[in-house]
Structures are given as structure tokens and as C-alpha cells.
Image: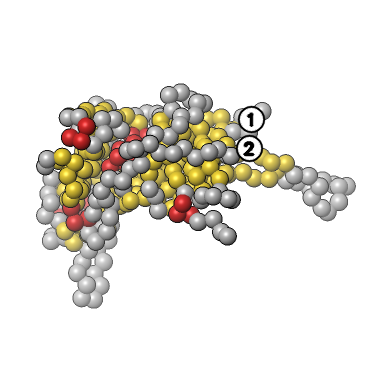
Amino acid sequence: MGIQSQAGQLGFKKQSAEGTFATPDKFMLYRGGSIAANRDLLIPDPEIGGGRDINAAYNGPVSYSGEFEFYARMEMLATLLGGAFGKVTSTAVGTGPTQVGTHVITPDDTSPWFSFEERVGTGVGSETFRYTDAKINSISLECEPDGYLQGTVGVLARKQTSGHAATVPAAGQLDVTPLLVGTNMTCTIGGLTTYITRSFQFDYNNNIEDDVFQLGSLYLADMTEKRREVTMGFTIRPTDLNLWKEATYGSSGASEAQAGAAVRKAMKVNIESYEFITGTTVFSLEIDVPQAVMQPFAIEPSGDDVIEYDIEVQAIRPSTATPICTATVVNALATA
């Protein structure tokens, strides 16, 4: 009998300190993915007089990385965004079944340490892995009008152990809150919602070092965040050439390419659930990028097709006092 993937389980929790495993208290449903070992055999170069065959092999140092694909639910997403961005400020109104939590998530210079627990399959032949000193390196979200809000989270980890009994989620720890769909999403560019936006993508990458080892140890010695990258993408049906001129010429009023700084626009995306948390309050996600520039792009007419733009957007930090982006999640939890 084979091992069925769908019986797996994934849980996580923010660590109180580096090097200390934290038993998961949040669990997520996910579509696929896993954390894998990155390790090479150390094979010596040929030696004169040693013959034509390889005569030695040692195991090299090891690191762990992987991605998980998921439909975005607002309880698990708040935690994952908080892990990637670094800072979460939560406020809650009400208690019990009427509680509503608002979580404002902004980038920080360092990412928190996490523990992950991954059960692969179930029953005979299955295995439960625990990862200590993990960081969320990247997170991507995307949505189309006829689809669900879905995402991919990239995880790096320093240490893996196996042979554990899987943690059984307590009541409320497995996120089964409603899914969000593109028919309930709005996108604004420069404060305007007049553009027909046909798809959306958001990518956040910490670019954490994952190849720094030290003598005398098998495991990663350092996991430092390098330059942060925040990008967005839209597919748009334009009603004029203004966006193209701004991206390619440098001004909507220009008749040829202009020198100088690129045009900066505010970008905002909001998506809500159709289900209510309580009263008139719904689960929601808002991503706010106060300043972003569009990559120059080409107009590509084709036959009788309606012209569309695939726009790539680079977020720019407006000042040291203003975050490069902010995500706000509304769910039923007091903390993310």
C-alpha cells in the first residue's frame, strides 16, 4: 500500500527563543509542498597514483528549505504574513463568538524564528518531521476573477528531526475559515478603480542567506535577511494610454521618453469574504503599497483581441518613517 499525501498535516508556531522548538498551535490546510533537505556528498578530486575510481565520500553540511501552496484563509495567513514581514500589531473587539481581530502587519529588519511540524502521510510508513529555527523567507499571493485567493510560502530551516508523534490540533487551531474569491476583490492604482483588472499577484521576498556554514557544524551558521523585494503584478484592460506612457515615457502627458525619476503611484488591493465573522464584519485582507513604480512594458496588439497590459510593479519605500507596504488582516483572533 502506498502513502497517501492528503492525510498529511502542517503546523507552526513562533518560537520564544532561537534554538527552542515550539509545539505548533496553528495548523493549515494546504494544496501541496514540503520542506526538503539540501545536502551534497563530498567527493574528492582525482589524485595522481590513486587509480581511476572514487575511493571516498562524506556527507556534507545540511540545510532545509521548501514551499507550501495553499488557499488563503485569514487566520493562518495573518501568522504567515507576520512571519515574513516581521512586525504585527493586533487589536481585538468583543469576546468569544463575537470577537473581531484586526492585525496590521508591517516589515521589520529581522524575521522571527518559527517552528514547523510536518506530517507526511499517515499510518505505517508515514513520518513526522519537526523543524527548529525556521524563517519565512517569502510569501506570494495571487487571484483571478474566476478563482480563489491562493498563495505560496517559502520556508528555510536550520534543523530537522524525525520520529515524532504528530501534534493533535486542539479545537480552533486548524484554520477552516472561509475562502476568499476574486469576485470580491478590488484593486486601485493611483487611487483609481476605473481600470479593468483581470488578475493580481503580490510577492514578498526576504532573500535570506541559506548557504552560510561554519567549521565544526553540520547546520546553517547564519540566516540573515538581505535586500527586501516587494513586487506586484496586474493584468489590465486599459481605456487609454496613460499607464503605458507613465511606465515607458515617464509621464502621461509626454509624447516621447523623458529623463528623470519614474512615476510613483499608490497601489492598494482589498479582498473580503462573503461570510460574516459577526454582524456586518467579514474576513478580509488589504495590501497597501504607498509608492510603487511600473516596469516599462510594450503594447502588444494581436488580431481582433482586446488590448491588455501585463504590468509589473516594484514597490519603493517612500521614507524611513513609512513602511514599504502594509498588510491588514481581519479575522476572529485576538493575536496573529
Q: Is residue 163 left or right of residue 81?
A: right
Q: Is residue 31 visible?
A: yes
**Label 1: few (<14), some or many (≥20) within 10 Å?**
few
Farthest residue in the right direction?
49
Would you say residue 234 is visible in this rendering? no
Q: Amino acid at mark 1?
A: Ser
The single residue placed furthest to the top in the displayed view is: 17
Q: CA distance from mark 2 to mark 1?
A: 7 Å
Q: Amino acid at mark 2?
A: Pro
The front one of 335 and 152 is 335
Which residue appears at 35% of the width and 31% of the height?
Answer: 86
Quadrant in which the N terminus is drawn: bottom right
Residue to which mark 2 is pinned: 61
Closest to the observer, 244 or 137: 137
Q: Is residue 48 left or right of residue 121?
A: right
Total residue callouts: 2
Q: Of marks 2 and 1, which one's residue comes earlier in the chain? A: 2
Q: Is residue 216 above or below residue 10?
A: above
> Residue at 22% of width from left, 72% of height from top?
305
Q: Measured along the vertical axis of the image, is residue 45 above or below residue 301?
A: above
Location of mark 1 (residue): 217
Quarter of the rendering occupied by the C terminus: top left
> In the image, residue 234 lies at what x, y percent?
25, 54
Residue at the (63%, 33%) spot, across then down: 218
Q: Quadrant of residue 215?
A: top right
Q: Position of residue 97 (x, y in %)?
A: 20, 36
Cβ atoms at labels 2 and 1 below 8 Å apart: yes
Q: Nearer the viewer, residue 68 or 2?
A: 2
Residue 221 locus on image (x, y percent): 56, 30
Task: Please state if 277 lies on the left or on the right of 169 as rendered.
Answer: left
Neighbours of disc 2 within 10 Å: few (<14), some (14-19), many (20+) = many
